[in-house]
Image: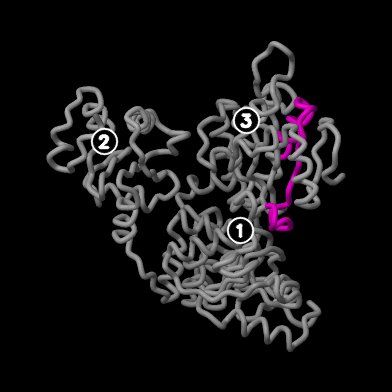
Amino acid sequence: MAGVGGGGGGGAVKEVKSKAALDQTIGEGSPVILHFWAPWCEASKHMDQVFTHLSTDFPLAHFYRVEAEEQPEISEAYSVSAVPYFVFFKDGTAVDTLEGADPTSLANKVAKVAGSISPGEPAAPASLGMAAGPTILETVQEFAKENGSGRVGSLSPSGAGDLLKKRLEQLVNSHSIMLFMKGSPESPKCGFSQKVVDILKKEKVKFGSFDILTDNEVREGLKKFSNWPTFPQLYCKGELLGGCDIAIAMHEGGELQEVFKDHGVEISDPSEIKATEHDGGQGGITGPSGLTTILTSRLQGLINSSEVMLFMKGKPDEPRCGFSRKVVDILRQEKVKFGSFDILSDDEVRQGLKVYSNWSSYPQLYIKGELIGGSDIVLEMQKSEELKKVLSKKGISSGETLEDRLKQLVNSSPVTLFMKGTPDAPRCGFSSKVVNALKEKGVDFGSFDILTDEGVRQGLKAYSNWPTFPQLYYKGELIGGCDIVMELHNNGDNLYLVYKYGIGNVIQ
């Protein structure tokens, strides 16, 4: 595709080739919309279809794609740490951003900076109703749900739930042994999937697989179907055995072999199993891969140089891409000591590790020599509390308890609101009411979106002995929820605040 250049938008999406060219285009003052994406992100691909249709509907605006990991200077400039991510410019200035798969918000924000499609008509997301079509929107809707967006209308037929359940039943029963994993057996996309593949090959059984990264409907649906929140998931004759840890324990204890035998699963002839031997379960391939013995030994040494090892772009104090920064932040939030290696400083390591790990992008996180994955997987593991469990099982202690973290959060601002969503985009009416009350009184406050962290969400209920949200704190002490705040706000009843907290001017 063409690079960034001058001229009008022309209704075509272009690729950004350099920051200098992009800055020049932005400086011309026309509306500009950037889509930061990554080739491994399915949500980016689907949102790009809506993005492309919007470029047709708003031909006077410039629409550009930025491959986030390949353009670290641009990603760094706009603090990109997740994809899909959109930045909106008007009159040479960045005026808005959007993170995640939310087609409605994307179209509305484009219309806001690019203006109406027809004179006299209000700005509206035309592509959502016309050009994009229902097929694209139904696909993107799943990603919108995953990103917590409640702003996408229901576009699926009423019987979609039953159809999905039937599809999942067919998938789990499609093979005697069925593995739902990230990637394929020949190219796993996470260390846990790699482990289970290796185990099945050692057990000498034939198995089917499904790459859950290619179908978000299956990925999210299977979590509820199986009541198992993570992947991989291993099934035998339609029955869930478990994930990576359970598969490892059953394999090492000989129980997996017994289960296969009891269910009549045939053991294949060794010659029929195209097993690829992996060094230490890390996905490192020697010989045919073209890696020399010296380089292989060096990579192994680097991976095992620290219990927690991060191969990243830049250094922990100076990350050179948003994805590397995200993993650094997560490890620091978990208070984990880790080593790092700047892959930009050594191209031999940068290219060799891709082959060794069978993982094509950076950053790459290893725990005790085992590949965990990249930024998207680490982020997902942190949100589900799986990262804490893995660190604990590996004997790597975190210096922070949940109670310590909650204390830190409630004291992070003099006035702190734990809510659903953000002050600019509340995700429930109660949170919205408290935000409005605080803003009306001119109160400066910090906030925390409890929808982004299930550990905090559940832990705070016990910590505060308050079962619902929002929760408002002043100097680390709970004031109350929506009803109490609104009563104080509406009736002017400030005695509680005046005498207990000495802040009679907080809510007048």
Q: Residue 323, labelled with which disc?
A: 1
What amino acid is at disc 1? Phe
**N-terminal label among 1 and 2:** 1
Residue nearest the viewer, comparing 198 with 420? 420
Q: Residue 109, labelled with which disc?
A: 3
Which SS class for mark 3?
helix
What amino acid is at disc 3? Lys
Which SS class for mark 2?
loop
Q: Which residues are magenta?
A: 48-74
* Left or right: residue 140 compared with residue 256: right
On the rendered image, what quadrant is the N terminus found in? Answer: top right
Tell me the distance, in whole angstroms, between the alpha carbons under discs 2 and 3.
Answer: 34 Å
Does 52 appear in magenta?
yes
Q: Quadrant of residue 144?
A: top right
Does 467 appear in magenta?
no
Tell me the distance, in whole angstroms, between the alpha carbons under discs 1 and 2.
Answer: 39 Å
Q: Which residue is mark 2?
A: 506
Q: Quadrant of residue 206?
A: bottom right
Residue nearest the viewer, comparing 46 with 404? 404
Q: Nearer the viewer, mark 2 or mark 3?
A: 2
Other-residue count near label 3 (Cα within 10 Å), few / some / many at <14 / 14–19 / ≥20: many
Measured as percent of width and height from the top left, residue 277 is found at 68, 78
Q: Is residue 488 above or below residue 249?
A: above
Residue nearest the viewer, comparing 301 with 23? 23
Q: Is residue 273 above or below residue 234?
A: below
Q: Is residue 20 above or below residue 419?
A: below
Q: Residue 351, labelled with which disc?
A: none
Measured as percent of width and height from the top left, residue 384 is found at 45, 55
